[in-house]
Amino acid sequence: EVDHRTDIWSLGVIMYEMLTGQLPFRAGHDAAVLYLIVNEEPGDITKICPDIPISLVQILKKALTKDVGERYQHVSELLMGLKALSTEHSPVDSGVARKGIIALLIVLIVVLTAIGGWFWWQQSRAAWARNVVLPEARALLHEGNGYAAFRLLGKAEAYIPDDPVLNELLSTWVVHATLTTDPPGAEIYIRDFYDSPDDWDFLGRSPLQEIRLPPDFIVLKAAAEGYQTQEVVRRGRLRNLRITLQPSADPPANMVYIPGGPYELRSMPAVQLDDYWIDKYEVTNRQFKEFVDNGGYEKQEYWTEPFIKNGIELSWDESMIFFRDRTGRPGPATWRLGTYAEGEDEYPVSGVSWYEAAAYAACAGKQLPTIYHWYNAAALQATNELTSYSNFSSSGPEKVGHPLRLGRFGTYDMAGNVKEWVWNETDGNRRFILGGGWNEPSYQFHLDDAQSPFDREPSYGFRCAKFSETLPASLTARIEGPTRDYRHESPAGEEAFAVYERLYHYDRSPFQANVDSVDDSAPYWRLERIEYDAPYGNERIPALLFLPKGVAPPYQAVVWFPGASAFIEGRPMAAAEGYKDWFLFIVRSGRAVLVPMYKGSYERHFGSPFQPHIFRDILIYSGKDLGRSIDYLETRTDIDHEKIAYTGFSMGAGVGPIMTAIEPRFKASVLLAGGLFSWRRAPEVEAVNFLPRVHVPTLMINGRHDFFFPLETSQKPMFDLLGTNPMDKRHRVFDSGHVPSERDEVIREVLDWLDRYLGPVK
């Protein structure tokens, strides 16, 4: 067994050689040396050094004994023996040989003192690693701060490499990966995605085999002489990582290289993409101003596509009148007097039509990316959890290049900030515009949108791409939009519906409810964080209950059902601030709002709602959670049990007919930005089968140009099929996209509806 006493034996070998000039075990080859070490004693040192003190001979014998039990058990014992020996023999009256021995003793004492100090320091570091670092690393992991824990575990390993707790953490949490680059030999750096963009740790030179990575979002940087430095975002769970660097000679300015390959969009056949370049940032005001100042609006050669508006082709002169700023000058709709607001040079240009974006790209020697190239660069599945740091549900665009908005391949702001025009056309002479805008919820990052190429909303912008060859027609061709037309579908019959409805039933047993915390700091409401038993398994339903201030109980109550982002991102409800904008005005009107954490949402996330079977499970569990949430409200004396309403947003509005058909206790329903989904799902979660069974007064609020829920084929059929009395249902359509931007009008409609069917708040 090799331990610290092996080192004491090795020190004895060195002492023997220092005293005699010979090794204690000498032979002509290694095997013979090993035999002597195991079976023979070292040569008699007194025959080589007659003047050596007997005490030193005894120290050497004890250090070199083959029986580890008889050997010094700690280096401090050896040090004590040498110190005692040095006081016994004064060098003043000694001979030359004895002086040499005493000098040796002094050297050994100094060395061993240093070793003892080092050993003490090492032991103190080991204690620090066990007692401080490991508990702190565990706490960081519990908090979700994986990279900081990763760094701490690396420090602990330097002092306690064999510690079982450390090795358990490393084996169960850290991921082993292989990283290669083209060309090889690049310097590889790593940093936490959420940390400072300048705080890098050096990993080594590629290729790197079996490197350890935290299973969180990280940024990798590859740098090699003669090549462009590249930064990429990766999830540490990946086992094989490869980064391709591009030669630094004449690269396109402020563009990033995107590797090609087969790419499958939605359920469409896979297409083959060659390698290409895409803008690192959205096109900025400063860049677009150069286009304007260089006569971009006067040079027809940049405006190559026919101008089609409402099915009619317009001339150049007829079309250009639509591309004016607020003061009638050529330029984006958000500009004045031919320019942008002071201080917004590096903000994305916004308020531009598809035609203006395409003309700018042509002037720059680039093109608008196709829908395939844009989605490939955006890497939806690889970065969807990062949308919480993107500019969604805010008051306006922000400067490009925020470090927390870095995409997988080194692009910025592909999620949020401004929606980005791409090349492809869809039905109705509309062009796709992707990524979601600053005024929309984060789930828009995952949804296709298409609008008239003449539209110039304040959230419309773009970025460009560069291709080495002319793109094939298969990539630039028209793509059909949502094709499911509910005008030609019929709901399920009574017998089938009875089967579907029973799937949402649950046993109404007693349950334990707790108020975990109370926050009374807001001026208009009191927030209670509560939990109550789910009607299945041993699970609990966390929820937020907003109670209005300045109103006497019992309160009217609204139960909220969120949009798809709550089920996609898997981030904590407390971090999802944007969702509150669509119901806090209800709280300020004097009503309570309950926000349950439905199974599949927020911390209870278990998969994407775009997967058909997961969607089915989410809705059936959510239906039971919804009923249980009303059960909870009915236990509270400060809630008016006869005045409870349902409000759903986007996905929550799309499934609203299911929830209000299975739950008769609602007295009103508000469906914001909802409709019938274009994809087919199991019949028990198809809202069309529940619509005739809805009898609660229902308000639908939609955008006329909603690409996800088309007006004619989705919204209107939903409204028409509602079983509600025609006098008690209303469809308010705004001239907007998926989410109506006329907030004041939306608020007025919702509050008027609740006043009408729950009664005015006193």
Image: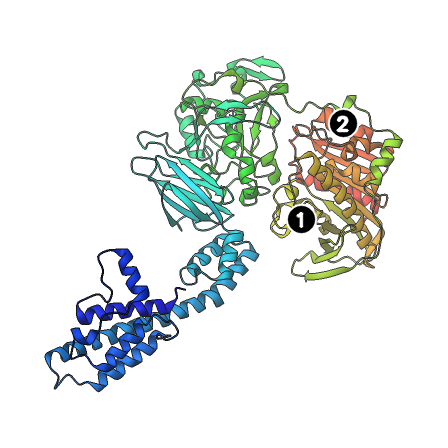
Residue located at (49% from left, 32% from top): 377
Label 1, residues with CA under 10 Å away: few <14, some 14-19, many ≥20 = some
Depth order, front residue of 117/555? 117
Q: Is residue 481 visible?
A: yes
Q: Amino acid at mark 1?
A: Arg
The outermost residue toward the right is: 495
Residue that mark 1 sits on? 604
Residue 716 tag number: 2
Nearer to us of marks 1 and 2 is 1
Label 2, residues with CA under 10 Å away: few <14, some 14-19, many ≥20 = some
Residue 646 tag number: none
Q: If you read the primary sequence from the N terminus, does the residue marked by circle 1 or circle 2 appear first?
A: 1
Residue 295: x, y in percent?
Answer: 41, 22
Residue 19: x, y in percent?
Answer: 19, 72
Residue 190: x, y in percent?
Answer: 41, 47
- Secondary structure type for disc 1: helix
Depth order, front residue of 114/503? 114
Q: Is residue 353 visible?
A: no
Residue located at (65% from left, 41% from top): 607
Depth order, front residue of 710/191? 191
Report, in whole angstroms, how far the alpha carbon at label 1 lies from the one at label 2.
Answer: 33 Å
Residue 135: x, y in percent?
Answer: 52, 64
